[in-house]
Amino acid sequence: MELFGADSASDDESAAPPPPPHHAALAIELLALRSLHSRAFPGCRWELLLRDVDPEVAKAVEAKGIQFTSSTSPPTSPPPSPPSLYDCVLSQSAAAPPPSSLLTFSGHLILLSSSSHSTSQPNLLPTPNTTSCPWKTPSLAKEKELLSKITLPRPASSMSASGLTDPLALPPCCIAGAASRLAEFGVVLIPSFLPPSAVQPLTDAALSDFEAASAKLLERGIDLSDPSTCPGMNYHELSAREDHRVDLRNGPAAKEMYGSPLHEQLTSIPGIVEIVERAFTPRSEADPTLHLGNYGLHNFGGRGPEETPAAERGRFGCVISAPGASDQAIHADTPHLFHHAQCPAHYVNFFVPGIDAGDEVGWTAFVPGSHELGRCRDLMEGGAAGKRETHEATVRPRHGLGDVLLFDCRVLHFGTGNTGGVVRPLHYVNYFKQGFRDNKNWDDRERIFS
């Protein structure tokens, strides 16, 4: 099966046809495309034309509610390099596609047609959290541009309400796009990825442990609402992160969650893991066979250089930001492994906002591109000019429940202040390259809960 117009100029009947895509994968990618287009250009519908439709593909596509027309005739005069719909969606200045136009999708051609064309601008880009960082430049143009670059728009995933059961929740095109952004900018935001029902048990467990730990510590004369009573706290279950901000893990409710199928699924989502592993072990574009020289991957039962080493993962933790928390100092969570050269990532964090709240609760701000040694040097050691550029390069994503974010732990970032009236849980999972560990800020010798 080929999408309408693909390879239509070839007359070589002896050439082997390309292998057909997996039926379910094709259907999910088409669903993502349709959702992206309808959100970017409201009022403008699109119609997909398929050529020589395989019955199984037709069933898979129809099962996703996608309307299409079968055709055996190619489009007339296809442009040599049709623009990508994703490029149109992500470009702030892009106008809506014309009422009838050809665009590319996963290497094929599709026909976009409209009965009611809208000229409205795309409206998928996240907006900055303007209530934080009053020192930011009044102009938001550059920040919006940077946000558009680190964001991978996608529809709500096809996961069931009870958990993550579909390994294709992130289609291949989204995985490639996210991996590319993570490598280039050190951070990628994926909106509307998780259903709220998958996040709520994490939030319930974190808030329960926070309340229980607060009560236990109060018995020892430590009041988490009074920073003067709790300087430098580090326990097996809780670690201080500045005033009114603590990191939680290993609490009673968390330990129950650690043994659940939902926790296993949320920490090993195939698409997320693949993005991380691509970041840890990228392959050379200049020399596509260079990785074959990594012969040590045959050791210890390995399958050799064609294998991508698996990422190691931690368990869910949660950073609690209580009302009164101020902006953190800008920092990176881990050092580079070497001083002399820029290496691939070795430590990536997966952020999952725990509540659907306003900007006042304080989300995390990032400086895209600062995971690179030279860029970070110029920003942090560049005097007044470097400081000004750091301010201009800072982005403050506004998060919604279900959004997720991946970042290279070498990228500069900081939590913004919580000026609201509610506790803000931010869940996370640490992913490590094999052999790396981050053991700072925790004291396993002293426990809050016996």
Image (tube, grey):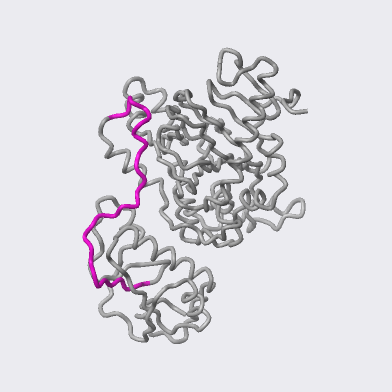
Queried whether the magenta region covers residue 301, the answer comes back as: no
Q: Position of residue 19 (x, y in %)?
A: 52, 76
Q: Residue 227 or 284: which is nearer the viewer?
A: 227
Give the prevailing secondary structure in the magenta stretch.
Answer: loop
**In the rendered image, the vertical position of residue 7 relative to residue 173, given as above or below:** below
**In the rendered image, the vertical position of residue 139 relative to residue 40, given as above or below:** above
Q: Position of residue 5 (x, y in %)?
A: 36, 78
Q: Is residue 272 left or right of residue 360?
A: right
Q: Which residue sits at x=66%, y=19%?
A: 218
Q: Position of residue 126 (x, y in %)?
A: 37, 45
Q: Which residue sits at x=34%, y=62%?
A: 37
Magenta stretch, residue numbers: 109-137
Queried whether the magenta region covers residue 133, the answer comes back as: yes
Q: How many marks?
A: 0
Q: Is residue 327 left or right of residue 431?
A: left
**In the rendered image, the vertical position of residue 228 relative to residue 97, given as above or below:** above
Q: Residue 186 or 292: which is nearer the viewer?
A: 186
Q: Quadrant of residue 116?
A: bottom left
Q: Residue 76 or 157: which is nearer the viewer?
A: 157
For the C terminus, the image quarter is top right
Q: Is residue 215 left or right of residue 197?
A: right
Q: Position of residue 282 (x, y in %)?
A: 54, 50
